[in-house]
Image: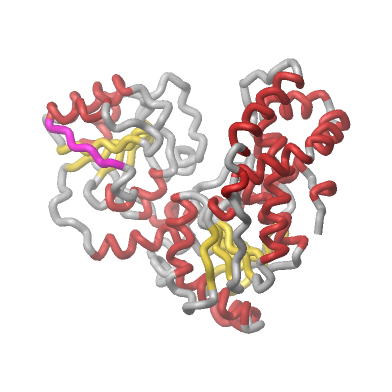
């Protein structure tokens, strides 16, 4: 099955062609190709050491990042032994991706010269992910050709190149494809086109509706990535009074973080958590002020949240994590960029935005709370019997699907609303 000629690179790379950008592309296609050839030789020097690896189980869960792992693990652990198998990035060696991409450069030229001026500019801007799309798809295609027992594919990402290639190849094999969110989504994401989608809640559904036509069955259940919260709530630490957690993003200014810490340290216990992509060394300077650190490489977001009673962070999906943990949070802009409310948390009233340290202090003094209604808008299982049990729910659904009994399972546990989406009874 060699369908690489027929793939839609715009659909696979939907987010690259739809998300706004201020970056400027290279003006000359030759320099794009030269850079690609450099990467080709860099990655294919050891190509003989790599071999394809295939799957033997009926259910494949794609563990392609730490966030994907956190989302899919609660499903995997509830499936019977011998039924399911994890698939890792190592199953798709990058050297083979570059090899197949190089061999399919004529397809890139064909699509480039057919494209509009605007699309050509984006193809020169994102030339590495665009050119390697052809290789990714072929490597994924070969994987499925040889994984002959596969019936169900489970993904926790819907927009990266590799996941879009997996989705496209799985459709061509007529496999059942299940999707559950690993994080909050945006309107720039591709339209839903999975067999079954288990979404966080109404907020995610509304964004996908704006993205385009929704295909497949959609369940508003919540995500397995939040199951850990229920367990940690049972082990909730008693000594979290007057403790504030500060989560830092890659775009944040360390000096602004330090300034806020110095303003608060005499009144609150503080724990600062740098983003996983940030070196923790610079933040260790805060230790001399009695400020603790949370190492995101060692401690999960939920373990961090279990130690605090209020969160402060710039724009980040961790605000939703905090709300579902029952921890109020404040948005404070640590970066030089203008506040945009990318996730809509402030607009929807889930969290409070404070533009200054003075207003932030006032908000802390007045007290903060979480609205159950607003939390459920983002996470359908919040304060319901389903809370903490999404992983087992999806695992049971997969088993019903394997037994050709999924319709009875759906009718027993869900009701269909007037818009055609499924809600837990």
Question: Is 137 placed left or right of 379 in the picture?
Answer: right
Observer-nearest residue: 218 or 224? 224
Give the colour scheme shown: secondary structure
At 53% from the left edge and 71% from the top edge, which residue is drawn? Answer: 84
Observer-nearest residue: 106 or 394? 106
At 42% from the left edge and 19% from the top edge, which residue is drawn? Answer: 336
Q: Main secondary structure of the magenta part?
A: loop
Observer-nearest residue: 369 or 380? 380
Question: Is 311 placed left or right of 47 in the picture?
Answer: left
Observer-nearest residue: 309 or 76? 76
At 53% from the left edge and 68% from the top edge, which residue is drawn? Answer: 85
Question: How many numbered markers are drawn?
Answer: 0
At 71% from the left edge and 49% from the top edge, which residue is drawn? Answer: 137
Is residue 147 placed above or below 297 in the rendered structure?
below
* Percent coordinates x, y for residue 341 in the rendering: 49, 34
Residue 420 in sight: no
Question: Is 61 placed left or right of 405 in the picture?
Answer: left
Please tell me whether residue 291 belongs to the stretch shown in magenta. Answer: yes
Residue 97 in sight: yes
Is residue 274 placed above or below 239 in the rendered structure?
above
User: Which quarter of the figure is the N terminus placed in?
Assistant: bottom right
* Percent coordinates x, y for residue 379 in the rendering: 47, 57
Which residue lies most toward the front here?
48
Is residue 273 placed above or below 286 in the rendered structure?
below
Which residue lies most toward the top here?
27
Is residue 377 placed above or below 81 in the rendered structure?
above
Question: Magenta residues?
Answer: 290-295
* Percent coordinates x, y for residue 171 in the rendering: 74, 61
Please tell me whether residue 36 belongs to the stretch shown in magenta. Answer: no
Where is residue 187, by image quadrant?
Answer: top right
* Percent coordinates x, y for residue 363 in the rendering: 27, 35
């Amino acid at each position: 099955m060699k369908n690489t000629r027929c793939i839609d690179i715009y659909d696979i790379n939907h987010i690259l062609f739809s998300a706004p950008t201020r970056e400027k592309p290279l003006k000359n296609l030759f320099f794009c190709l030269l850079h690609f050839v450099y990467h080709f030789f860099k990655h294919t020097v050891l190509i003989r050491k790599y071999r394809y690896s295939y799957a033997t189980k009926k259910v494949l869960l794609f563990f392609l990042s730490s966030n994907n792992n956190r989302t899919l693990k609660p499903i995997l652990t509830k499936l019977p032994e011998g039924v399911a198998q994890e698939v890792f990035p190592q199953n798709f060696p990058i050297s083979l991706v570059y090899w197949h991409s190089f061999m399919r450069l004529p397809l890139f030229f064909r699509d480039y010269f057919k494209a509009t001026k605007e699309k050509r500019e984006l193809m020169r801007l994102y030339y590495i992910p665009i050119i390697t799309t052809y290789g990714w798809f072929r490597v994924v295609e070969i994987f499925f050709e040889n994984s002959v027992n596969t019936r169900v594919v489970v993904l926790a990402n819907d927009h990266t190149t590799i996941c879009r290639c997996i989705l496209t190849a799985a459709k061509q094999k007529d496999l059942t494809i299940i999707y559950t969110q690993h994080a909050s989504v945006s309107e720039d994401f591709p339209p839903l086109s999975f067999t079954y989608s288990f979404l966080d809640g109404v907020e995610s559904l509304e964004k996908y509706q704006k993205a385009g036509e929704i295909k497949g069955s959609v369940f508003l259940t919540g995500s397995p990535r939040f199951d850990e919260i229920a367990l940690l709530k049972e082990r909730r630490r008693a000594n979290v009074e007057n403790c504030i957690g500060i989560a830092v993003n890659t775009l944040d200014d360390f000096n602004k973080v330090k300034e806020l810490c110095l303003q608060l340290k005499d009144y609150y216990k503080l724990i600062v958590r740098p983003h996983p992509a940030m070196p923790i060394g610079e933040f260790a300077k805060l230790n001399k002020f009695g400020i603790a650190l949370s190492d995101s490489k060692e401690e999960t977001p939920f373990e961090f949240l279990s130690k605090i009673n209020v969160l402060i962070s710039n724009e980040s999906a961790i605000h939703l994590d905090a709300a579902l943990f029952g921890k109020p949070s404040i948005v404070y802009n640590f970066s030089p960029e203008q506040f945009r409310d990318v996730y809509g948390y402030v607009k929807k009233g889930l969290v409070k935005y404070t533009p200054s340290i003075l207003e932030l202090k006032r908000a802390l003094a007045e007290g903060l709370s979480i609205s159950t209604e607003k939390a459920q808008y983002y996470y359908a299982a919040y304060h319901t019997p389903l809370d903490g049990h999404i992983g087992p729910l999806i695992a049971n659904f997969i088993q019903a699907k394997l037994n050709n009994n999924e319709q009875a399972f759906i009718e027993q546990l869900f009701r269909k609303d007037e818009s055609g989406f499924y809600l837990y009874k």
